[in-house]
Image (cartoon, grey):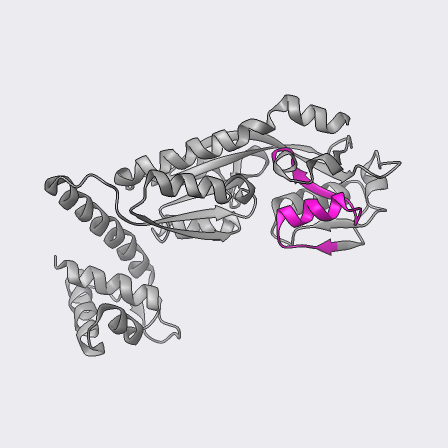
Amino acid sequence: MDTRELEALIAVADAQSFHGAADKLGLTQPAVTRRIQRLEDRIGTSLFDRSTKPLQPTPAGHRALTEARDLLRRLDGFTDAISGDTRRQGPFRLGVSHGSAPLLTAPELRELHQSFPDISLSIKSGWSSELLPLLRRGEIDAMLSLDGPNGIVGGIQTRDLPASLVPQRLLDDHIVAIGPKSARHHPTSITELARHPMVLMPEGCTFRALGNAWARKNGVEFNSVLEVSALELQIEMVAAGAGYGIMARRFCMHSPASDRIRILDIPGMNWDMAITLIRRTSSGDLNDIIDKIGDIVIRAGEMSNPDHAQMLSAS
């Protein structure tokens, strides 16, 4: 198989057009079109839906893209091994869910870059449900995710993930209700909590979904909600007295506002969760980088051990 055809396949998918792929590859548009047509003839099916704008891969195209990315990456690794250049090079694409982002901040990313200086790191952030399909299609190489209760990632239990994906549980934690330490009296039930303003992430956040479900189960709902799009901003706003929130213990401990918030003891509002690193079984040549990410995240979470979290709750 001609690797130039695979490169054209990836370029067209990334650019979502033949014209954009031609610019990226330094070719004419007809030349790119011919490479894709040859590949389609060889496979025996269309790889792109040419009736859509922007251009989108067909189901077969998504599968071909996954294999093409893996094959080209392995070929690069083969060349490096034979030439004696063992330094890891090229792009590495990491998905980071909104819920896990506080554990992979600038110092951690700097350490990763120092360990692999020749890697071009690309980070895609989003909800776990958005990142998981990208990982399955090979559009990202690994993802760091916040599991919900019962080991659910992106709406799927980890035990039900396809065999092509391998989850690694890095850290255990709990989702809890938090409030400003400055308040004289804190709510002690979901009914009391619902009477207060709430500072929450947008719909789609596991924290918010759990809180809403628990409120409905108890016959109440959060009527006054201030939406924020970043976990750290949510913690800061709770600490400033703008309302109450729902958050992971570890993120409270990592926050610069940790000494201005309090974890509340509200019956039923204490859900198990975990930080999970998911990789693809075909990413063997990237395992050293993915392992390093796991080590960095585990060390970043060491400061928020259960003893520290209990101290925060009692303060």
Q: Which residues are magenta?
A: 226-250
Residue 172: x and y, percent?
Answer: 55, 29
Residue positioned most to the top: 307
Residue positioned most to the right: 184
Residue 226: x and y, percent?
Answer: 74, 55
Q: Is residue 241 magenta?
A: yes
Residue 20 visible, this angle:
yes
Q: Looking at the picture, does residue 18 appear above or below residue 86?
A: below
Quadrant for the N terminus in the image = bottom left
Which quadrant of the structure image shows residue 26?
bottom left
Residue 55: x and y, percent?
Answer: 35, 71
Q: Is residue 201 magenta?
A: no
Residue 141: x and y, percent?
Answer: 35, 46
Quadrant for the C terminus in the image = top right
Residue 162 visible, this angle:
no
Q: Residue at x 37, y 43 (%)?
A: 113
Left or right: where does residue 236 sit relative to residue 185?
Answer: left
Q: Residue at x 15, y 62 (%)?
A: 42
Q: Residue at x 69, y 40 (%)?
A: 257
Q: Nearer the viewer, residue 147 or 312?
A: 312
Q: Residue at x 62, y 51 (%)?
A: 230
